[in-house]
Image (cartoon, helix red, strand yellow):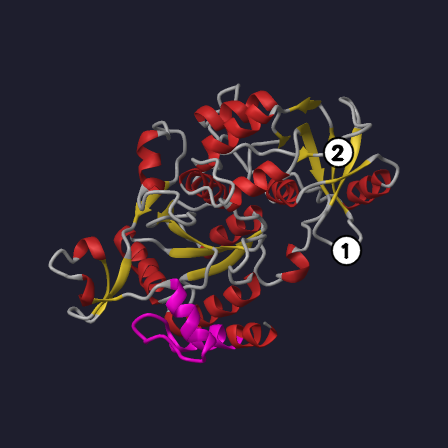
């Protein structure tokens, strides 16, 4: 199986030993506490689950600035975005302390991890802006990723962590949330050698479904990992439980058995476009995948990124050999009325716009809210039914 990034084996930071786990939980109650941001909590979950192998904890300021600038830590590890614990209030916390990190997303703020604080560093407004602009390609305050990053605070705590729980993800998504360790183990159990991953934060319409089939056929894979983000999204995005239900229904009805793994990971969406696409590839390698589908406007939002910037970054900023995973470059996919099937638009040069079934997100939302299923060329009826039920309930609340 493909090796994890920068390591011979995964290094999850979750404490699996029962006695040690119990002792650390008891210790945590005696330690100074820090209520972390949702972004820092998500980083802890990803570190705990092995997705961020080989990192041992949160990056310091020098590594964060280096990663933002050159996609590389100061000791030469390739990494696309800073993995940080930024806070507004580190009063009383000093280097050399052990502290309990508390979860902002679960009632009662339980202990998420214990951190050995190696450094407490003030980050200037200029350094925050430098990182944000490099990560997101913009400093526009309307960009949801920029908003979130700049709102966390100007004090950076760095050092290794020991993770004690996976926040709300295991409880809320018991059938879907999986660690990188669990995914890698299941791939091995299935005997899959070549595996392509599909990243999603949205329900999957017909074009997404067919894109997965195209990738599997073109690459000759043993299976596909449909891997959905389960964490925080921007307002208006469809919540994870609805996406989960619609994807499961699509796979149940339209894919051959034992060709798809449906899983999810505990992370908040960055909306960082190209940089996030590289992060997606890196942690899918840690899951045991050999390929990642990178489509049009992958991990994008609004008009901040060019349609294929998330593909060209792999040519322009990812050094040869930096990762072992390969990307499958996809174009916009849509149903061709001429050919009576879903195609990549680049493969249909003789088509005009009217030859495709194209619906805007706004139009689809309007139809679903009114109880009207989009045409079957756009969305499977079973999927549309789940989405219609959700939108009609939401609209009734409004």
Residue 42: x percent and y percent? 62, 45
The disc placed on residue 107 is 1
Residue 351: x percent and y percent? 14, 61
- In the rendered structure, the answer to whether residue 269 lies left or right of residue 49 reads left
Q: What secondary structure characterizes most of the magenta part?
A: helix
Using a 10 Å C-alpha cutoff, classify the residue at mark 1 as few (fewer than 14 neighbours), some (14 to 19) or many (20 or more): few
Residue 174 or residue 396, whichever sits in front: 396
Using a 10 Å C-alpha cutoff, classify the residue at mark 2 as few (fewer than 14 neighbours), some (14 to 19) or many (20 or more): some
Instruction: Give the number of marks.
Output: 2
Q: Is residue 152 above or below residue 178?
A: above
**Residue lying furthest left:** 350
The residue pinned by badge 2 equals 89
- In the rendered structure, the answer to whether residue 96 lies left or right of residue 186 reads right
Does the rendering let one see residue 77?
no
Q: Is residue 223 above or below residue 87?
A: below
Q: Is residue 48 above or below residue 213?
A: above
Image marks 1 and 2: residues in contact by CB distance under 8 Å: no
């Amino acid at each position: 199986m493909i090796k994890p990034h920068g390591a011979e084996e995964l290094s999850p930071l979750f404490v699996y030993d029962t006695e040690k786990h119990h002792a650390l939980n008891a210790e945590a109650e005696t330690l100074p506490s820090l209520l972390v941001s949702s972004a820092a909590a998500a980083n802890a979950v990803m570190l705990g689950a092995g997705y961020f192998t080989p990192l041992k904890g949160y990056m310091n300021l020098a590594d964060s600035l280096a990663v933002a600038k050159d996609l590389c830590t100061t000791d030469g590890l390739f990494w696309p975005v800073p993995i940080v614990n930024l806070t507004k209030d580190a009063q009383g916390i000093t280097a050399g302390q052990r502290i309990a990190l508390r979860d902002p997303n679960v009632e009662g703020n339980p202990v998420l991890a214990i951190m050995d604080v190696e450094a407490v560093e003030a980050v200037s407004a200029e350094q925050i802006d430098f990182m944000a602009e490099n990560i997101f390609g913009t400093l526009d305050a309307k960009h949801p990723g920029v908003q979130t990053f700049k709102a966390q605070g100007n004090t950076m705590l760095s050092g290794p962590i020991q993770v004690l729980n996976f926040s709300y993800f295991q409880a809320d998504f018991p059938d879907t949330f999986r660690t990188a360790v669990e995914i890698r183990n299941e791939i091995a159990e299935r005997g899959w050698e070549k595996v392509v991953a599909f990243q999603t934060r949205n329900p999957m319409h017909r074009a997404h479904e067919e894109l997965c089939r195209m990738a599997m056929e073109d690459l000759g894979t043993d299976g596909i990992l449909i891997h959905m983000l389960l964490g925080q999204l921007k307002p208006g995005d469809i919540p994870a439980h609805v996406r989960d239900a619609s994807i499961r229904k699509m796979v149940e009805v339209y894919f051959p058995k034992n060709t798809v793994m449906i899983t999810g990971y505990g992370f908040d969406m960055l909306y960082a476009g190209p940089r996030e696409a590289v992060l997606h590839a890196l942690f899918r390698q840690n899951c045991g995948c050999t390929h990642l589908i990178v489509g049009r406007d992958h991990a994008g939002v609004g008009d901040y990124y060019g349609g294929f910037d998330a593909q060209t970054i792999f040519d322009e900023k990812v050094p040869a050999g930096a990762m072992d995973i390969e990307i499958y470059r996809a174009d916009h996919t849509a149903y061709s009325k001429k050919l009576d099937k879903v195609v990549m638009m680049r493969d249909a040069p003789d088509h005009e716009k009217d030859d495709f079934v194209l619906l805007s997100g706004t139009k689809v939302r309007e139809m679903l809210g009114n109880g009207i299923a989009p045409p079957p060329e756009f969305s499977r009826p079973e999927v549309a039914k789940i989405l219609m039920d959700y939108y009609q309930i939401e609209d009734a609340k409004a």
